[in-house]
Image (tube, rainbow, N blue to C red):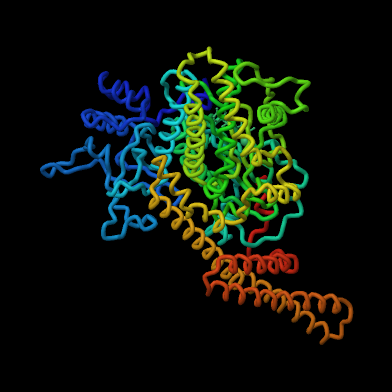
């Protein structure tokens, strides 16, 4: 085995998992801890002391001197406050880490957004270990820190983070599924939501990045004329990965493997300098934490390669933006319920789940849309590349036909093929490659899972996944209600359901499909016709963040989250307020940054070009030179009117920034950019103050 291949055998070396637990804890404690992890229960306080002791030794053996409760505050990134193991006892230094320090922490994190849940005088919050996500080591160039993944709550018990609602939504779906599965005659089992998050990103040379205040401060370019070559030739997608990038990817994967993150697939994406990393799917909570670490790792490793990793949804205008496809499924007792299965009984469960998801997405498209809203994603959703802002479901032609046969069992159209009896007939084979090829659907069934494609590349998966779990829990419950009301359940044993049960189920699904099929759309989501058709079907279309977030302020949505114990009305409102404020702040930062770049960098460059041209022209006139003066004059007019337009644009942006209207700022920024991007072609390359698209987009 070579050094390189050995990296794969280091998988999980920096995670306090199976092997470390067995090595550093007593047999009894190890067993108890494993049970806690598997059942997703809080840690038994009686073993906390020994677990903490074991974890500290394990961490110190890996060079850690500090520990932190690692959590997901509402800012969208991760948070850590480090404490050292060092304590003084009678003046002597000792290394210590108590059970109490493992279970709860009090980061006094009063500066995190709480959306009104806390006021500063009662600002303390506390963090609590979530043992389903294992402790891990985070390394830096001269040391390491033990990280304990935690939930972050206020002393009132209200959640101040993105993890707590996710955990609650997983419990909600578990309760609903247990109920439904019981009706299907399945025994008690563990529900496992699964997530595979495909992560798209851009890489840019750090030297260019440093010279672009817009990239540094906002994560995206606010100016820049298109490069002659962009993604027209479609030659980047799945192309040969440049060596520089490949060695970066290798380092990223090694770091991820050490953290027990199963990075699996890497490839070039559609835009030049755009790439993707896909891990193998894992249980949702862990996968969501892991995605946060993937983003961290991409950023950190890029630095070592003289690169910057851009996780913004739209770093460059005119080429594709970046998303984060959330592949979601749910397994019960180890069996994926979204796998169509091979026998009529499995098919019946699958069809029920399929209908539940369709019902959930149709009823709560507004919430799904809100869950992916943000200033960055606004440039992506509906911008003719990523999925449109209208949420619809793709199921593919085969399944569409199956659903139609369920919905219209007696239609003449299906007579030739006969009716499809749930629980009796086997589904036709659903080939995987028939699933959404054109990738335009925001929510696509892809063989044995749903792929939610609307989330932006920088989003924390917890938000969209919390919504999805909750709305599916509700739909599953509603179907279970009707099944219970039909009073044909209870007798069924696995594999031998009564015809009455299946007839009842058939009617329930028929009714559900009739009510919710409008959300199913198998065509090309980029076509303008679809927007017209979607409007006719009454599907909501929230084109920007403020309109999308309005869903979080609706009383019926607050009631839904409360009913499922996922968020209280106050928790939901706090999120609405935090996200809206974050949006306004981001737009403002961009506005100020654009104004500064325009007035301090672009305007002076244009002025210099103008002055030089005017001087040349005057000189030529003075010397009585006729040739070339017409061209110089033309340039002077172009540059002069550009200069005026630029100044006007800056004034307009300034005026917008004096107000509070986000849209006015965005529109003034767009206008200013148009002017500046034209001027880029009128100023000498050597004088242009910003690295250009053609420089930044090609990493060879
Ligand atoms: P594509 O690029 O065609 O969408 P990939 O294979 O790159 O497909 O990514 C698919 C993702 O879906 C991977 O992360 C994979 O692990 C994940 N996945 C596969 N099965 C499931 C499942 N049952 N639940 C959740 N995610 C899944
Ligand atoms: Mg995908």
| Residue located farthest toward the bottom when viewing the structure as drawn | 622
Foreground residue, 54 or 308? 54
Instruction: Measuring from the top left, give residue 62's x and y in whole percent.
Output: 34, 32
Would you place residue 130 above or below residue 545 in this image? above
- The quadrant holding residue 577 is bottom left
Identified at 29% across, 40% down, the residue is 65
Instruction: Measuring from the top left, give residue 315's x and y in whole percent.
Output: 61, 53
Identified at 54% across, 33% down, the residue is 328
Residue 456 is at least partly visible in this image: no
Instruction: Measuring from the top left, give residue 692's x and y in whole percent.
Output: 67, 58
Foreground residue, 699 or 329? 329
Identified at 75% across, 81% down, the residue is 614
| Residue located farthest toward the right when viewing the structure as drawn | 627
| Residue located farthest toward the left when viewing the structure as drawn | 90
- The quadrant holding residue 398 is top right
Instruction: Measuring from the top left, give residue 533's x and y in whole percent.
Output: 72, 48
Residue 32 is at least partly visible in this image: yes
Foreground residue, 463 or 209? 463
Does residue 621 appear to the left or right of 113 in the view shown?
A: right
Q: Quadrant of the C terminus?
A: top right
Figure quadrant, ligand 1:
top right
């Amino acid at each position: 085995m070579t050094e390189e291949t050995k990296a794969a055998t280091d998988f999980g070396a920096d995670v306090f998992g199976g092997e470390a637990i067995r090595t550093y804890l007593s047999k009894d404690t190890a067993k108890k801890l494993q049970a806690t992890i598997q059942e997703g229960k809080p840690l038994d306080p009686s073993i906390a002391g020994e677990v903490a002791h074991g974890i500290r030794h394990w961490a110190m053996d890996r060079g850690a001197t500090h520990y932190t409760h690692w959590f997901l505050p509402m800012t969208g990134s991760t948070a850590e406050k480090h404490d050292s193991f060092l304590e003084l006892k009678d003046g002597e230094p000792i290394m210590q880490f108590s059970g109490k320090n493992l279970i709860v922490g009090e980061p006094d994190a009063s500066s995190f957004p709480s959306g009104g849940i806390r006021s500063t005088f009662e600002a303390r919050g506390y963090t609590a270990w979530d043992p389903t996500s294992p402790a891990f080591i985070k390394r830096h160039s001269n040391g390491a820190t033990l990280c304990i993944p935690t939930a972050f709550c206020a002393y009132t018990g209200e959640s101040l983070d993105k993890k707590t609602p996710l955990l609650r939504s997983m419990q909600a779906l578990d309760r609903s599924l247990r109920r439904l599965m019981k009706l299907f005659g399945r025994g008690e089992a563990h529900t496992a939501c699964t997530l595979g998050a495909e992560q798209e990103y851009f890489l840019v040379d750090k030297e260019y990045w440093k010279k672009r205040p817009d990239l540094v401060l906002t994560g995206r370019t606010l100016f820049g004329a298109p490069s002659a070559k962009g993604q027209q030739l479609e030659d980047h997608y799945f192309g040969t990965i440049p060596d520089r990038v490949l060695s970066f990817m290798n380092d990223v994967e090694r770091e991820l493997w050490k953290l027990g993150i199963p990075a699996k697939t890497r490839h070039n994406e559609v835009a030049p300098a755009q790439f993707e990393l896909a891990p193998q799917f894992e249980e949702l909570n862990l996968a969501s934490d892991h995605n946060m670490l993937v983003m961290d790792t991409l950023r950190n490793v890029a630095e070592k390669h003289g690169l910057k990793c851009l996780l913004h949804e739209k770093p460059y205008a005119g080429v594709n933006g970046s998303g984060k496809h959330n592949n979601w499924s749910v397994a019960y007792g180890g069996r994926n319920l979204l796998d169509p299965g091979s026998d009529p009984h499995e098919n019946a469960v699958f069809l029920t789940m399929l209908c539940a998801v369709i019902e959930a997405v149709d009823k709560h498209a507004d919430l799904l849309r809100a869950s992916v809203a943000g200033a960055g994603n606004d440039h992506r959703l509906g911008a003719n590349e990523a999925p449109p802002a209208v949420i619809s479901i793709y199921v593919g032609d085969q399944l569409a036909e199956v659903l139609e046969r369920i919905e219209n069992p007696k239609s003449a159209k299906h007579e030739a093929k006969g009716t499809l009896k749930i629980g009796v007939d086997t589904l036709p084979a659903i080939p995987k490659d028939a699933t959404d090829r054109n990738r335009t659907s925001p929510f696509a069934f892809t063989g044995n899972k749903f792929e939610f494609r609307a989330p932006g590349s920088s989003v924390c998966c917890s938000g969209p996944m919390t919504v999805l779990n909750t709305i599916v829990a509700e739909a599953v419950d509603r179907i279970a209600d009707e099944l219970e009301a039909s009073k044909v359940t209870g007798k069924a044993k696995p594999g031998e359901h009564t015809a009455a049960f299946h007839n009842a189920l058939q009617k329930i699904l028929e009714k559900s499909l009739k009510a919710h099929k409008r959300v199913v759309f198998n065509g090309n989501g980029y076509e303008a016709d679809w927007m017209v058709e979607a409007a006719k079907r009454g599907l909501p279309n929230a084109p920007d963040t403020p309109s999308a977030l309005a869903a979080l302020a609706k009383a019926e949505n607050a009631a839904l989250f409360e009913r499922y114990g996922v968020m209280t009305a106050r928790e939901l409102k706090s999120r609405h307020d935090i996200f809206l404020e974050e949006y306004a702040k981001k737009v403002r930062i961009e506005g100020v940054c654009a104004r500064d770049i325009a007035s301090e960098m672009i305007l002076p460059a244009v002025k210099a070009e103008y002055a030089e041209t005017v001087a040349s022209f005057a000189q030529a006139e003075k010397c009585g030179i006729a040739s070339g003066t017409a061209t110089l004059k033309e340039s002077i007019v172009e540059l002069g009117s550009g200069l005026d337009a630029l100044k006007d644009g800056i004034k307009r942006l300034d005026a917008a920034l004096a107000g509070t209207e986000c849209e006015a700022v965005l529109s003034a920024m767009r206008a200013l950019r148009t002017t500046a991007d034209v001027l880029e072609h009128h100023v000498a390359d050597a004088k242009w103050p910003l690295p250009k698209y053609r420089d930044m987009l090609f990493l060879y």
